Amino acid sequence: MPPQITVAVATILRVFLEDPEKDHYGYDLMKKTGFASGKIYPLLARLRAAGWLTVAEEDIDPAVAGRPARRGYRLTAEGARVARLELARLNDQLRPSAALRGLRLGEGLQ
């Protein structure tokens, strides 16, 4: 089932679409979105369950590297397609109506 496009989902999808061919790591996603790990990883799990993300674990020896292997998340082709459509739809929904377009800062509707 596709995830609901919340502000958080839209935010993370926007980051992925900045470079859809690149692996994105949890820590980097936290820095780019401002979300804590407790928010990022459930979002990634939902996007992965929907088939929008793939996950690849680094092929390193943690003892040699001195850190655990990182998981890289990347949009699938379908994930990128749907993400673009959903963000475009959200953008259309948030576009000001004709009545609001002519307003200037400090003015209100009459």
Image: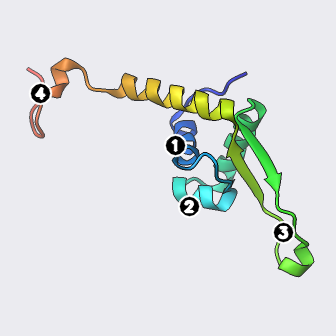
Foreground label between 1 and 4: 1
- Of residues 97 and 39, the one drawn nearer to the viewer in this rendering: 97
Ranked by sequence position, the earlier of labels 1 and 2 is 1
Could you tell me how far apart the alpha carbons at marks 1 and 4 are, in whole angstroms? 28 Å
Q: Residue 102 — which label?
A: 4
Q: Secondary structure at mark 1?
A: helix
Could you tell me how far apart the alpha carbons at marks 3 and 4 are, in whole angstroms? 54 Å
Q: Quadrant of the C terminus?
A: top left
Callout 4, which amino acid?
A: Gly
Callout 1, which amino acid?
A: Arg
Identify the residue position indicated by label 2 in the image. 31
Identify the residue position indicated by label 1 in the image. 14
Query: On the image, which quarter does residue 99 sit in?
Result: top left
Ranked by sequence position, the earlier of labels 3 and 4 is 3
- Using the image, determine if residue 50 lies above or below residue 63: above
Q: Residue 105 — which label?
A: none
Identify the residue position indicated by label 3 in the image. 68
Ranked by sequence position, the earlier of labels 4 and 2 is 2
Q: Secondary structure at mark 2?
A: helix
User: How far from the left and from the top, in percent, is residue 85?
Assistant: 52, 26
